Image (cartoon, rainbow, N blue to C red):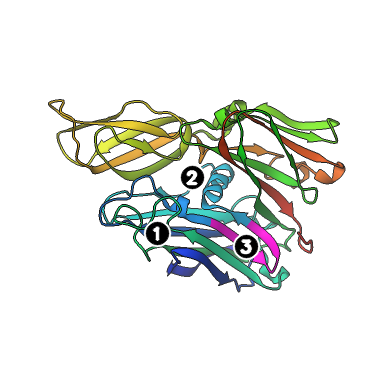
Amino acid sequence: MQYRNIELYFEQALDDVGTKIIDLRTSDPISAIRFNFRGTNGTSYNKDNRLDDVITKIELVDGSDQLISLTLKEVQALQFRSTGRLPRYRPSEGASAVSDMSGMLMFGRYLWDPEYYMDLSKFRNPQLKITTNIAAVAALSATAFATGTLKVTMDLLTIPEGAVAAKGFVMAKNIYGFTSGTSGDEHIDMPMDYPYIGLLLRAYTLGNDIDENISRLKINCDAGKFIPVDKKVIDLYRREQDDLGSAMIEYIIFRRLDDVVTHIINHDPIISLQASARATLIAADYSYSGRFPIRIDTHAGVGISTDADIYMRVTGGCPHSTVYVPMGLRALPETYFDPKKFGDIDLVLTQAAASAVAVVLEQLRPYGAAA
């Protein structure tokens, strides 16, 4: 087999607010599309405002046929589940600093899959769409992102020789979103068309673990005839830790004594901090649910109330406040969950606190099938 990394764009400018439409024109099988996003801070700082907040949607469409539809957070969370590693994640909060982070859309069961990949010749007008909102968290100012600084580098990971005739591709979509309540069940009618590879659940509110927002996940087929999943969300997280281990991020925060720092590692985070200046003592007072208050002192025990760069590494579980439910063995399509065997599939989420909830479904879609 031959593998090729084609740089389609290098630091292509993105709008502050809008949708960049990119025509895709290649006959080579595409195993994945890799993105690297960059943005520059204002002249003071840019705290708790990251590129994964402002890259609000990544889509692959063919006319009205939606093949992929995810946020950057969802792209990164799925990449962790399929590869065992989060993509490059390097925010930087200081004055005029440049942040960058990556994400990869994978169309096969694994990278360089010779049987399942994106074959653009099967579609009439394939287009990639990247939607941005630079002010999604903070309005343009000296303490947010600087206007006109969002950019993307985009690579096509192709297989020029050695791939067999395409059997299909992995289709990933955000299929449902809602705001959870403090009790009761949310019932979601699930798609009945293509085999399920896995389901990603995100339930986010600042200061809560994911299982404090959605406590239980159940998939109910034909009114209880078959129940493939019925688990506490905390147990889903524990299983993921057994299978994948911890996720890790690294970046440069710009902080002072008693600031509260947020990050994307939701469950059981372990924080490592390194000062950029000598004679500085630094620690996380405690850490939970993707946030911690920071302690910064001189060696004499005097608190430092001036912002400074601090190098941070965080490890733990549930990146972006997500858990993933595999619906078969990823390498073996014959083990995937087949919804066509049932007349009705109901996803039941038990609510425990107010949070922003999203459900993402990965399916194996054959070519020649309309969505």
Q: Quadrant of the C terminus?
A: bottom right
- Contact check, label 1 and label 2, Cβ < 8 Å: no
Label 2: state its secondary structure: loop
Q: Residue 227 at x, y = what percent?
A: 78, 31
- Residue type pointed to by label 1: Arg
Region rendered in magenta: 57-68
Judging by the rendered image, the residue that carries numbered circle 2 is 86
Judging by the rendered image, the residue that carries numbered circle 3 is 60
Of residue 214 and residue 114, the one placed in the foreground of this image is 214
- Residue 31 appears in the figure: no
Q: Residue 133 at x, y = what percent?
A: 47, 58
Magenta stretch, main secondary structure class: strand
In the image: residue 236, left or right of residue 15: right
Between the residue at mark 1 and the residue at mark 2, the CA separation in whole angstroms equals 17 Å
Between the residue at mark 3 and the residue at mark 2, the CA separation in whole angstroms equals 22 Å
- Residue type pointed to by label 2: Leu
